[in-house]
Image (tube, rainbow, N blue to C red):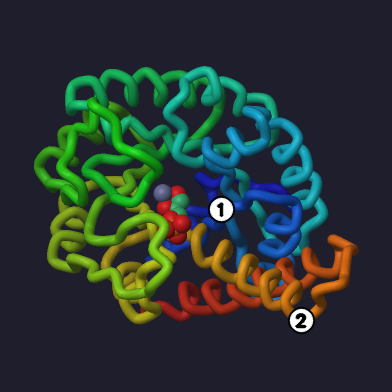
Amino acid sequence: PLTTTGELVAEAAARRSAVAAFNVITLEHVEAVIAAAETVGEPVVLQVSENAVKFRAGRLHPIAAAAVSAARDSAVPVALHLDHVKDEALLREVADCGFSSVMFDAAHLPYAENVAATRRAARWAHANGLWLEAELGEVGGKDGRGPLDAHAPGARTEPGEARRYVEETGVDALAVAIGSSHAMTSRDAVIDHALLAALHDCLPLPLVLHGSSGVPDEELQRAVLGGISKVNIGTALSIAMTGAIRAHLDADPKGVDPRRYLAAGRQAVTDTVVQLLRTVAAAPVR
Ligand code: G3H
Ligand code: ZN
């Protein structure tokens, strides 16, 4: 069934565990992630990023409608989330498409502007029944940096500033920069567990780990143990899907039916998500 991100994160946090959130780009991703969640018997968040919406010529509703339909039919609870939104017009589109939450990303703005934009987004989200996540610090590896980037690449989240930020913005969850980075194709990120502990001690809301594809299994489990309640994973699915499709096409150079290679790609995503869900679910409890 379709549920809300707020409920899944709150339940995970209450269990001192984390819910995994997977970035979906195509209908095959949606099907693969839900099939994996059903196999493992774990709830899951499907998230669509602003970049994935741009890939669909700026249209959120087609992929959202497919994800809502698949979530409703699912045997496990599935929540839908709009990820890394910078465009306030896109933010407003999420109100009537079945998504329950959004990550508003103003981390590139100087502190005062980040606070002002995020507070505005959080007020709007709450008035529309949506749960809102924001980011402070810089989880690196996002597409492009602009003149307004507030942080040095890889700048960590500072606990005192984060506390003030949460009070000033009223957000429901905070993405923290503690050593992970987006779009890593190797799993060798080093997490600053002491910083995570300091953030977890002083912040009264769930913490989110972005760029989790580059984090080794044991480090991921330690981060959950240390207070991460939502684990965002995207690139690992891209690696699995692209690798399987490439292998399929190499082995069958004359084939033309897209269903053949898309099925191979979808199965590889399912297998990867099964493993990652098991890793997160097996994290030791605090
Ligand atoms: O918001 C999405 C995540 O941070 C995904 O990061 O693609 O590096 O796993 P990743
Ligand atoms: Zn992210």
Q: Is residue 270 visible?
A: no
Q: Which residue is mark 2?
A: 251
Q: Is residue 283 above or below residue 256?
A: below
Q: Marks 1/2: CA distance?
A: 28 Å
Task: Using residue 266 as the reference point, say whether residue 50 is left or right of it.
Answer: left
Which part of the image, by quadrant, shows the C terminus? bottom left
Query: In this view of the protein, can residue 276 be seen by the observer?
Result: yes
- Work out whether 21 lies above or below 191: above
- Residue 136 image offset from top left, x and y in percent: 25, 40
Q: Which mark is residue 23?
A: 1
- Is ligand 1 closer than 8 angstroms to the Cβ of mark 1? yes
Callout 2 environment at 10 Å: few (<14), some (14 to 19), or many (20+)? few
Q: Nearer the viewer, mark 1 or mark 2?
A: 2
- Which of these two is toward me, 140 or 38? 140
Give the mark nearer the N terminus: 1 vs 2: 1
In the image, residue 233 lies at what x, y percent?
48, 60
* Left or right of 20 in this view: 58: right
Q: Is residue 174 above or below residue 244?
A: above
Residue at the extreme front of the image, as rendered: 254
- Residue at 47% in and 20% down: 88
Residue type (three-letter) at the residue carrying disc 1: Asn
Query: Which residue is rendered at x = 35% and y = 37% of the image?
Result: 134
